[in-house]
Amino acid sequence: MTQWHHRDRGPITEEKLLKAVHILADIVENRGPVFRPLYHDVRQQLTDFRLQEQADAAAAEIAAPPEGKVA
């Protein structure tokens, strides 16, 4: 257990959240609705993560200097 606690998990990525959603969907299907709130919470985190990524990309695009123009 202590090995898991000290393990470097790295940054949260869309792939990790998507994998968690799929795993929790299987658990809810096989074990019942008691896990449904956790499933919905992780799905919401995935949605929020995607929205934040889109907002960050849009902000970076706006902040980038226009290409092809010489000052």
Image (spheres, helix red, strand yellow):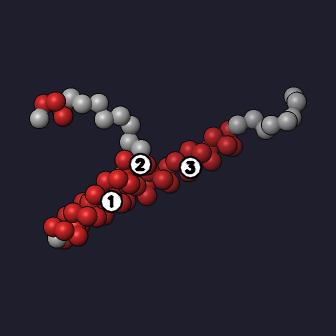
Q: Residues within 10 Å of mark 3 (few under 14, many from 20)?
A: few
Residue type of the residue flagged with mark 1 = His
Q: In the rendered structure, are the residues bearing label 3 and label 1 in contact, judged by CB atoms less than 8 Å apart?
A: no
Residue type of the residue flagged with mark 3 = Ala
* Residue that mark 1 sits on: 22
* Image coords of residue 53 (percent x, y): 52, 48
* Residue that mark 2 sits on: 15
Residue at the location (18% across, 33% down)?
A: 5
Residue at the location (86% across, 35% down)?
A: 69
* Image coords of residue 65 (percent x, y): 75, 35
Q: Quadrant of residue 29?
A: bottom left
> How far apart are the alpha carbons under marks 3 and 1?
25 Å
> Going by the image, does 68 lie left or right of 21?
right
Sequence-earlier tag: 3 or 1: 1
Sequence-earlier tag: 1 or 2: 2
Q: Is residue 37 visible?
A: no
Q: How many marks?
A: 3
Q: Secondary structure at mark 1?
A: helix
Q: Residues within 10 Å of mark 1 (few under 14, many from 20)?
A: some
> Going by the image, does 10 lie left or right of 6?
right
* Image coords of residue 49 (percent x, y): 44, 51
Q: Secondary structure at mark 3?
A: helix
Quarter of the rendering occupied by the C terminus: top right
* Residue that mark 3 sits on: 55
Residue at the location (38% across, 37% down)?
A: 11
Q: Nearer the viewer, residue 13 or 48?
A: 13
